[in-house]
Amino acid sequence: MDFLGYQLRNNLFVAPMAGVTDRPFRQLCKKLGAGLAVSEMVTSNSLLYGSAKTRRRADHEGEVDPIAVQIAGADPATMALAARYNVDRGAQIIDINMGCPAKKVCNVMAGSALMQDEPLVARILETVVAAVPDTPVTLKFRTGWNRDNRNAPRIASIAEASGIRAIAIHGRTRADQYQGCAEYDTIALVKSQVKIPVIANGDIDTPQKARFVLDYTGADGLMIGRAAQGRPWLFREIEHFLLTGELLPPPPVAEIHGILRGHLADLYAFYGEETGVRIARKHISWYTRGLVGSANFRHAMNQLQGIAEQLAATDEFFLGHAAANERLRHEDRMQEMKAA
């Protein structure tokens, strides 16, 4: 897929997720079939540029091009500075966050809260685009502020007029958070009204759903977030299905163990032992969804403090399942998630 002048493997995008889409996760998803991975949100507050968290989020060493960085904020001038700061540090695409529904973001009128103020949206987009004239700027947003105010078509029109090169739309309003089902009618409407690429996002958790959303919305690509947590091979499954119409078999537990082991090694190297072990806990939890005994394992594993202990517990759990030549079915994962 040609996207903003870059030749991508396909039209499957990893959604930016705070605390999830760090460099190790982005690299893993690209390795397993994603065409593009957007960084977790980077603050536009220049006072935080020197923080360890912000420096890590701007660390793109070894990443496959193009490098896409998402910035968040509510002040046009500050957002412009953030865009330039990240371009100077290797960003090749700047993405603007107007989709995050988290209270701590919306309470400062950033993220999806911005959709309530369309004139401010225009000022932010125009200012950021002008600040990095040689770098494509994209925008992620939701269908609206609430179900009575689905203004995504107007936001999309503002974005196109402001010089935004592509948009991604999550099929829920800010008020919906992540509850209920994503709707795709609004995305299809936006796609019919703008000429820039439109990426559909929300509840894309199987190859069949990916095919449906592409056909229903006419979108140029798909953005996948929560469904890839602990399941980064979802991208290769969707890629294969879209190309061939055939479903790949579920991955054997032995392969999942190998993928997780590599992911953990990258997390420890990236964060160091203390933070790496803490960050790894949630990823290990996601990888074990749907496996017998996973709830008890997660409880015990979350008490462990060091790399050696964490790896030993992980190996013991997965090797026990791998010995039985098990495969992890999506249906088993979904049952556990619904029961949680």
Image (tube, rainbow, N blue to C red):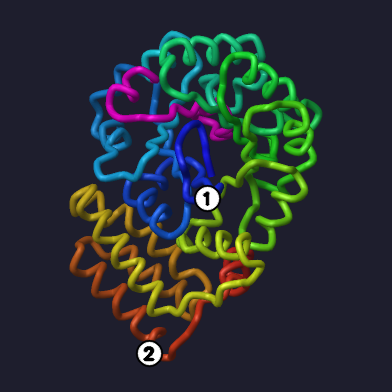
Q: Which mark is residue 212?
A: none
Vertically, is 6 above or below 194? below
Q: Which mark is residue 323?
A: 2
Identify the image quadrant of residue 103.
top right
Vertically, is 159 above or below 310? above
Residue at x-position 43% and y-position 74%: 296
- Image coordinates for residue 172, horizontal then vertical, percent: 69, 39
Q: What's the residue type where badge 1 is placed?
A: Asn
- Membership of 97 in magenta stretch: yes
Figure disc tally: 2
Locate the N terminus by quadrant. top right
Q: Which residue is mark 1?
A: 10
Element under disc 2:
loop
Locate the C terminus by quadrant. bottom right
Element under disc 1:
loop
Mark 1 or 2, which is nearer the eye? 1
The range drawn in magenta is 83-106
Q: Is residue 311 left or right of residue 26?
A: left
Residue at x-position 30% and y-position 33%: 58
Q: Is residue 168 left or right of residue 209?
A: left
Question: How far apart are labels 1 and 2 at the CA level?
Answer: 35 Å
- Image coordinates for residue 16, horizontal then vertical, percent: 48, 40
Residue at x-position 29% and y-position 22%: 88
Between residue 270 and residue 284, name the one nearer to us: 270
